[in-house]
Amino acid sequence: MTLDMQKRANEVIIPLYPQKKVALASGDGVRVKDTEGKSYIDFAAGIAVCSLGHNHPVMHKAITEQLDTGLIMTVGSYPTEPKLKAAELLINNCCQEQIFFCNSGAEAVEGSLKLARAWAHKNKSEDCKEFITFKGSFHGRTYGAVSATYKSLKQPKFGPYLQGMHFADYGDLDSVKALITDKICGIIFEPVQGEGGLMPGDAQFFQGLRKLCDEHQIVMISDEIQAGMGRMGTLMAHEAFEYEPDVVCLAKGMGSGFPVGAFMAKKKFTEAFEAGDHGTTYGGNPLATNVVYHVVSEMLSDGFLDHVNKASAHFLSKLETLKSESNTGTITDVRGKGLMIGIDTKFKCASLLNKLLENGLLATQAGANTLRLTPPLTVNESEIDEAVDIIAQTLRDETLELVE
């Protein structure tokens, strides 16, 4: 069946993702099964999306509850109880004051970039339309978002991109200062660079950015699409790094697999928008926002975030032990924060991922050669131990391809 599905996919799906050698059919908790009935531990979780894992009762309740009302879609100008409840829950547990729901992380970034430009246009000058972003960044695939993404510099075939994007060195405050002019309206960054090799920033760097933004009236945009929504052991990623942004971008984990995104900001900035300046057809629909309300409520329930922190500590400890036991230098680095962890090895990541898949573990690649592990936030210690055992077994495979 898998080969048949691969053949069908190759015929009708644009080949932007190389088809894996397995076809997934079902999931439960941190495990998924393929069409042949083989079970895998899912430490990809849709790239940090399935925050509650697969087949979670909260997701069943959220979706069926709203389906039973018969109302899954409205024009955005109509208030609905799910949208208001989701908005109030997020705002009451964050430093922001208003929210706009959309459909994806890229859309959240697009809205944030527009908001920063609108605010600067009204409050600074009509020429203040440029941004500082960072080398190693990833903010999405749409034109504004990809223009702020570092890899755009290596993809000229899609140009011209949005003008006025300046790339600083991540973690280097001096490199940011060197790029500040009276044309900079916003600074956008990830608390942990996902595609940039799982590189976490630090509180001192982010607090320095906060000070620069205050001094120069620059909008501070925190892209928490991958690192946010409980993944750092705090609801919002910026809490874990002790800074307060002006705008926050969210998606991925807030829907636990259901497509939804949002950006939040302080009223000082949202007042720059006028009716019609921005919009979306599907964003904020009752079905999506009912999912958000229930997923975030689960994350805020007693013990949930404590569990994430304990699981993170256990996972990092196990990986560090595995690294130290690798006397051949098989693992060259372990880094990350919360349940967003990267491993560098002496093997090509594509080769390693294929062998891990054969051995029953799903993971993803981040950057040039970093194995990315983003399990569901519900993962327990025994499941972590099982995953680490698979990693250890796979790293001993003599057929793995070495990095040249």
Image (cartoon, rainbow, N blue to C red):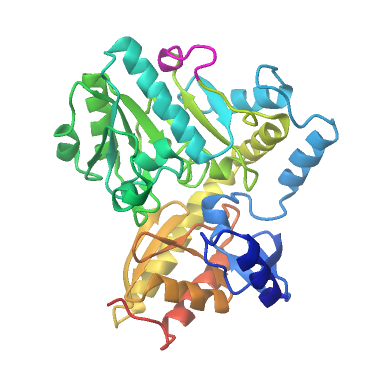
Q: Estimate the x, y position of residue 273 in percent, counting from the top left.
A: 46, 15
Q: Tell me where residue 322 sits by quadrant.
A: bottom left
Using the image, determine if residue 393 lies above or below residue 145: below
Q: Is residue 130 left or right of residue 340?
A: left
Foreground residue, 149 or 47?
A: 149
Foreground residue, 28 or 168?
A: 168
Foreground residue, 250 or 206?
A: 250
In this orientation, does residue 235 appear?
no
Q: In which quadrant will I find the N terminus?
A: bottom right
Q: Is 158 contained in the magenta span?
A: no
Q: Estimate the x, y position of residue 316 in percent, counting from the top left.
A: 42, 61
Q: Is residue 397 left or right of residue 387?
A: left
Q: Residue at x 41, y 42 (%)?
A: 139
Q: Tell me where residue 220 sits by quadrant.
A: top left
Q: Residue at x 58, y 29 (%)?
A: 101
In this orientation, does residue 302 appear?
yes
Using the image, determine if residue 189 lies above or below residue 192: above
Q: Estimate the x, y position of residue 184 in percent, counting from the top left.
A: 25, 25
**Magenta stretch prevailing secondary structure:** loop
Q: Is residue 14 left or right of residue 328?
A: right
Q: Residue at x 53, y 46 (%)?
A: 306
Q: In which quadrant will I find the C terminus?
A: bottom left
Q: Estimate the x, y position of residue 53 in percent, counting from the top left.
A: 64, 54
Residue located farthest toward the bottom when viewing the structure as drawn: 398
The part of the chain drawn in magenta is 268-277
Using the image, determine if residue 64 lies above or below residue 370: above
Q: Is 269 contained in the magenta span?
A: yes
Q: How many marks?
A: 0
